[in-house]
Amino acid sequence: MKSTYLAAVCTDLTGPSSIRILEKQARPLSPGEVRIKVRAAGLNFPDLLMTQGKYQFRPDPPFVPGLEAAGEVIEVASNVESIKAGDRVMAGGKGGALAEQWIVSETSVSPLPPSLSFSEGACWQTGASTAWHALVERGHLQPGESVLILGASGGVGMAAVKMAKHIGAIVIGTGSSKEKRNAIKEAGADHVLDPASSELAAEIKALTDGKGVDVVFDPVGGDLALTATRAISWNGRYLIVGFASGTIPSFPANHVMIKTYSLIGVRAGESPRRDPGQATRQSNALRDLAALGVMRPHISHSFPLAESANALSVLEQRQAIGRVVVELHTSS
Ligand SMILES: NC(=O)c1ccc[n+]([C@@H]2O[C@H](COP(=O)([O-])OP(=O)(O)OC[C@H]3O[C@@H](n4cnc5c(N)ncnc54)[C@H](OP(=O)(O)O)[C@@H]3O)[C@@H](O)[C@H]2O)c1
């Protein structure tokens, strides 16, 4: 194991341009920890927000972004029994993945299924857990129901398209360019729409025989959210996932009452941390889905570690389709 390693470090909260590739000193493991040689790190929208100081979890610089990665275990603490050096794994944490080495707790590591490459594994957990948690645990999406997925070309959006099709739902996805709409269709959506259309609510209703969609999956927010509530069915379920548009919507209570729809908050990471029963359900479901290759991520951009700032800029400029990955080829 190398005593020093390279990491992409956010040096101040001015966004991707503040990223510097710096050498860091490897620290000894604490009980329950595992050291991973990172082969690929998947970027998520919260990584971008963290470099701008705009995420709910706001680490002070200098810090290493990166919430998920895949690689090989190179060391485990003496009390770790479920994982050993040499295992190929996927891992999640609250930052630090954009580096040649990453220390995480034993509980946040799972085996990399043979069906996924290192890059796919690095991009699997956040999208898959968010899509599963929102659609299954919170949304109770049923086969034959209709679901509108906003931001369907994004990381969590595309995982949601694939999860909803796996459930057997009728999927309508929005994508802001022809290229994005083609990719959403390829991911399995039954219908694709342009979120900028002035007739969007009417177009969604036309696709659902005038009824509106049973479920909305919304990682975008802003004005699009209010348009989507005009196309939700009586008794519909509106899943509030995120605010990639940068604007947090306010929903008029009278509209919620008149259409009797439910606004449902989604926190795919925090909810299982607070509810051990849910954590078990979620990890069992995700293990099975990963083994089946369900929600295999679509990766539109990959960069070496040295270009981590450019990788984050792809998210900032709304260019990603599916996922952006940083691939590492460490020599030790
Ligand atoms: N609640 C949870 O548990 C949970 C878990 C993970 C992520 N999230 C949240 O989900 C959101 C999406 O994350 P992600 O990783 O999927 O992001 P992403 O890959 O960047 O996708 C976001 C999508 O939103 C759309 N969008 C609309 N306005 C945008 C804007 N101004 N800038 C960027 N994108 C815009 C884009 O699609 P179009 O161009 O087609 O509009 C884009 O594909 C984030 O807010 C994140 O924090 C929540």
Image (cartoon, rainbow, N blue to C red):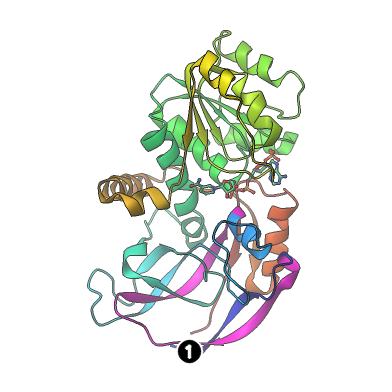
- Specify the amino acid type for callout 1: Lys
Q: Specify whether residue 288 is in view.
A: yes
Q: Is residue 192 visible?
A: no
The image shows residue 10, relative to residue 299, as above or below, that is below
Judging from the image, what secondary structure is the residue with disc 1 in? Answer: loop
Residue lying furthest front: 254
User: Position of 51 compared to 166: left or right?
Assistant: right
Q: Extreme top residue here? A: 209
Query: Ligand 1 shows up in which quadrant of the image?
Result: top right
Between 282 and 58, the residue placed more toward the observer is 58
Instruction: Tell me where residue 21 appears, x and y as whole percent.
Output: 66, 79
Tell me where residue 194 appears, x and y as whole percent. Answer: 72, 28
What residue did someone put label 1 on? 2
Magenta range: 16-45
Q: Is residue 288 above or below residue 29?
A: above
In terms of secondary structure, what is the magenta stretch mainly? strand
Whether ligand 1 has any atom under 8 Å from the Cβ at mark 1 is answered as no
